[in-house]
Image: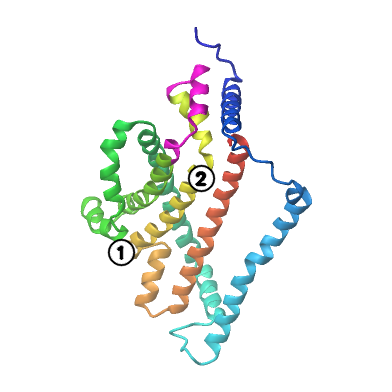
Amino acid sequence: MEPHLTGNSVVDARAAAAATTTADATQAGTSKAPAPASGWSPAGVRSRNWARLPLGMLLPAIVLAAWQIASTAGAFSPVQLPSPAMVFTAASELVARGELGTHIAISTQRVLIGFSIGAALGLFLGATVGLSRLPDALLSPTLGALRAVPSLAWVPLLILWMRIGEDSKITLIIIGAFFPVFTTVSLALRHVDRNLVEAARAFGLKGVRLLTTVQLPAVVPSVFSGLRLALAQAWLFLVAAELIASSMGLGFLLTDSQNNGRTDRMFLAIIMLAVIGKITDALLGLAEKWAVKRWA
């Protein structure tokens, strides 16, 4: 007769698996003494967090100073290396004309849509391949070969099939976001603790419920590692799409500035891509911290 499934079954399963793992480690003589807790005091954690921001801003400040010195020392012409003030002026001009905000909004929208769809597909197929040998044998060789195709190689084909429009750009971003999530999820699920899975099954969990309540929470850090890689890939593939077939967006701003000899706007587009990419990654990092506290 199956054990009665209650709201605490997942907790009980994890506890049982932990007890089994601890017992196995003790019998094997591999148990380790706990690490000293003094280094993880609340005061120490807070001090490290306060130190991260100024330390993180140190290198950008050095780069900005070196940029200013190099642009005013006469080693480069303004066309080759515009000064930070020239880039700021170019940004002010585009803001006054309402163009910079439009470029940023369009590119961000494309990335978010493509990333969401690509990550969802990667999560679904990664779980399918990671949990079953048959889909692994059927899909892994083909998907592994497609993953090696460079992003620019997809552009002519997507334009041929979908014309120059939003569909081709978002599809390219979906391709870029899919593979990091698929790879990390499939590999992580293959290495979930078997004791945890068996204990959960003993409490009546199976199929989708076993996946969503036990197996995926067990690999939360790996899932978010894949999501953060996928987000970075989404921005890379966005630029690849907008460089070739676009009339708006930060990638288009790069190409248009190159054609018009506006190096200041080229630097502006690169800086905007870096800043917005970091902001979206930081937001995903906050979601990761919440998910790790909630499930891991």
Residue 20, given in percent of the width and then of the height, sits at 57, 26
Residue located 25% across and 44% down the image: 142
The secondary structure that dominates the magenta segment is helix
Quick check: 76 above or below 117? below
Answer left or right for 162 relative to 73: left
Q: Nearer the viewer, residue 25 or 92?
A: 25
Q: Nearer the viewer, residue 152 or 261?
A: 152
- State the scheme by which the image is colored: rainbow
Residue of label 2: 224
Q: What secondary structure is found at the residue carrying circle 1? A: helix
Residue located 41% across and 41% down the image: 187
Residue of label 1: 244
Residue located 61% across and 20% down the image: 8
Q: Nearer the viewer, residue 9 or 290?
A: 9
Segment tinted magenta in the rendering:
188-207
> If you read the primary sequence from the N terminus, does the residue marked by circle 1 or circle 2 appear first?
2
Q: Quadrant of the C terminus?
A: top right
Answer left or right for 290 relative to 280: right
> Magenta span has 196?
yes
Residue 83, given in percent of the width and then of the height, sits at 53, 82
Looking at the picture, which amino acid does disc 1 mark?
Answer: Ile
Q: What secondary structure is found at the residue carrying circle 2? A: helix
Residue 184, given in percent of the width and then of the height, sits at 43, 45
Looking at the picture, which amino acid does disc 2 mark?
Answer: Phe
Residue 133, given in percent of the width and then of the height, sits at 32, 32
Residue 239 in view = yes
Q: Are marks 1 and 2 in contact (CB under 8 Å)?
A: no
